[in-house]
Image (cartoon, helix red, strand yellow):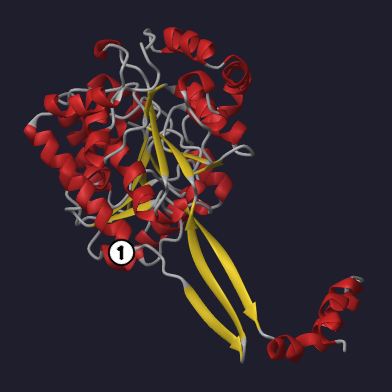
Amino acid sequence: MRSFVWDGEITAQRVRELIPRAAVSIDSVFPSVQKLIAEVQSEGAAALARHAQEFDGVVPNSFRVPISAIKASEADLPDGLREAITESIARVRKVSQATLPRAVSLEVSAGGAVETRFVPVDSVGLYVPGGKAVYPSSTVMNVVPAQVAGVPRIAVSSPAQKDNDGLPSNAVLATCSLLGIDEVYSIGGASAIAALAFGVVEIGMEPVRMVTGPGNIYVAAAKRQLRSQIAIDSEAGPTEILIIADESANPAFVAADLICQAEHDENAASVLLTNSQSLIDEVLAELERQGTKTANSDRVAIALGGNQSALVLVESIDQAIEIANEYATEHLEIQTADPVAVSKRITNAGAIFLGNHTPVSLGDYLAGSNHVLPTGEQAKFASGLSVMSFLRSQQVVNYNEAALKEVANKLEVFAEAEGLPAHSEAVQIRFED
């Protein structure tokens, strides 16, 4: 794993040059994704079958998973996994309910009020990946906040699995069953995003208003191309972790957390910023020790050896904070003597994990937070998935005659200044005899 000393100024451009994300270009797959989308839109189920054979190696007997199969999947769920999923559901639901916004009504003047209320989107398609790994956890993270927000129709789509007779992962199906979701589709990749956006008449699939969930570069490209047709959460790229640590950090913990993210994908980014050379030396030793023992060691080695991963020696934690805010990571861990104080100075991060006993993997499964987070600097302007993602704010304006008359003259001044006299006339007509 490469290491270097940060020298010189901190700018967005230098951060991108010295700690680059993996060279994964959504634009490079745009033409092929555009073709897949067009085929699904024009050919429907025939295109889905062709794509399933090509990308998943199996064509489902039914793209819509029978309710009986969803229910039956629970029987094969090991008790330990059932308990873990159930606990995850409960914790994410608890946080989602606590963050559910309440309507606010304000009397601006006597007889004039503005209410802000929150209304759920009427339908969402939740995508659950199924490539290098299967993700019952992502099912929880997508479904629970949508349910708490009150979304009336929730559809889940996940790739067909050859070893499950063309159905999605059994763990994903069982999680849907535990959540009470009965609209599930065996469709993966860009094809799934297109099907959710346009609907597929032959399989009884109606279009949805919004699509959320992580996925590969093809899923991200499909989201980008279809965002005028549907709302999306974000264009998720390869996962990433940045750790700010000082000499008080445990090198075994730091190394384990870098490895944890690296096992997701060969393009995953694992970055350490520290003001301690001895910590870097110890982390390197731990990476060698732990990395060779972990089950996905080959994938880990590629990710940690990539240019997107690095151990960076900084002159101070202040400098680490400045770099971290420019990097805008998906996951930020702070393992310092006072992680709370450091966290208060972080402006750009998808989620922040404080101290030695709050690893990112806790957030992936059981913290109660959501693991669908912005990647690739999107944390500078976007948020992680939450109950708010599925809500729209509406303003309800209610003025009586006296309240309108109070501002009629000022409104006329505005209208004349903007060359829109009919705006004022629409008010004045209400006060004519």
State whether residue 186 is above or below residue 90.
above
Query: Is residue 19 placed above or below 145 in the rendered structure?
Result: above
- Left or right of 80, for residue 308: right
- Which residue occupies the extreme front position in the image? 433
| Quarter assignment of residue 399 | bottom right
Residue 247 x/y as whole percent: 22, 55
Q: Is residue 64 left or right of residue 21?
A: left
Residue at the (36%, 8%) spot, across then down: 58
Q: Residues within 10 Å of mark 1 (few under 14, many from 20)?
A: few
Q: Residue at x 17, y 26 (%)?
A: 294
Residue 259 in sight from this viewpoint: no
Kindly identify the residue that appears in the image at 50 percent across and 24 percent down: 190
Percent x, y of residue 161: 31, 15
Q: Is residue 369 visible?
A: yes
Q: Residue at x 84, y 73 (%)?
A: 423
> In the visual, does 396 lie left or right of 128?
right
Q: Nearer the viewer, residue 302 or 149?
A: 149
Per the image, label 1 sits on a secondary structure element best described as: helix
Q: Nearer the viewer, residue 133 or 333?
A: 133
Position of the N terminus, as image quadrant, is top left
Q: Which residue is mark 1?
A: 98
- Which quadrant of the figure has residue 138? top left
**Image quadrant containing the C terminus:** bottom right
Q: Is residue 35 above or below residue 26?
A: above
Q: Along the line of sight, which residue is nearer the eye, 147 or 243?
A: 147
What's the amino acid at mark 1?
Ala
182 to 145, vertically: above or below: above
Residue 325 x %, y %: 46, 55
